[in-house]
Amino acid sequence: SQPLKLECERTGIGKNWFTNGTVVTPTNGELATTPGPIRTITILSFSPSHAKGYTCSVSATPLRTYPVILETPPSVPEITPPSQVQGVMLSGSGTSLTVSWTAPTGTAILYVVRYSTDSGTETDPPSDAMKRSGITATTTTLTGLQSGTTYYVWVAAEILGAGVQGPYSMRMPIPVPSQVRNIKINQTVSNGMINLQVTWNQPTSDRTIQHYEIQYSKDGVSRWTSVTPNPTTRQTTIRNVDKGNVYTVRVRAVSDVGS
């Protein structure tokens, strides 16, 4: 804050500043000066004792009184930033990604989500990372993403209306299941139909495998046919294939983050 400075121009001698009929002396944070024809009083720091009238006078004859009122500003509570968001989870694939997390301690919280194809650091997203703010729920869906691209996501909480933000919490991309290997095909005959019994090994995955997608083709290049419904176990049967043809079969595992 700035000091309060009161000035009074004089034409003669004997001009002083008074409060309650008493000449002000340079005490209690008050400083009286007389540079040339101007007599000045400066209150360097305010306290309740300065809430009074200051009168510029010749002897005890008032010329002008300046009331000084000390008002106490309302107290502003200290705002503690919210704690770090925990339990950030990602799901989805293709051009959208659903982000969810656990609310930190505190009330009236909004959330900020940043995402980028650059990894940044654990608590510091790249400066050019995309941003979504003003999120009120503990989940949001990012859309318009580039299919087949890896995205890194950061989530932070902030206090509503205060602009005070907590630290970011990062979620690394979740890898899709590994390639299905050791595919085996056995030919069987049932009721005059030739069937292909297909089995495979369990692929590695950080997420639960929801199902498998199986396709087969006569030339192994085009005209792939999908087996329906998608099996949830590591085996399936391709029924009623043509005799004398060589078939190519491909299998992939699908989790909630893709395949």
Image (cartoon, rainbow, N blue to C red):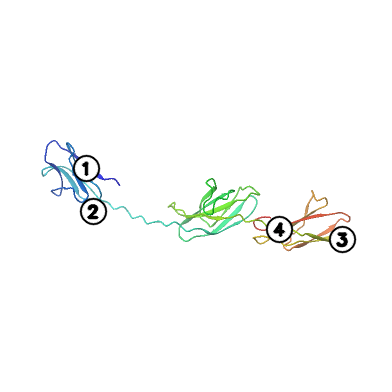
Tell me the kind of residue under disc 2: Pro
Q: Which residue is mark 4?
A: 253
Vertically, is 198 above or below 145?
below
In the rendered view, tell whether residue 95 sits above or below residue 234. above
User: Looking at the image, is 226 positioned above or below residue 59?
Assistant: below
What whole-number distance in Å separates the C-alpha atoms at marks 2 and 1?
Answer: 18 Å
> Spatial distance from mark 1 to mark 3, Cα to Cα?
109 Å
**Secondary-structure class at tag 2:** helix
Q: Residues within 10 Å of mark 1 (few under 14, many from 20)?
A: some
Mark drawn on residue 184 = none
**Residue placed under numbered mark 2 in the picture:** 48
Q: Earlier in the sequence, mark 4 or mark 2?
A: 2
Please, what secondary structure does the residue beneath circle 1 have? Answer: strand
Residue 255 is left or right of residue 186, and the answer is left
Which residue was labeled with disc 3? 193
Residue depicted at 78% across the width and 51% down the height = 224
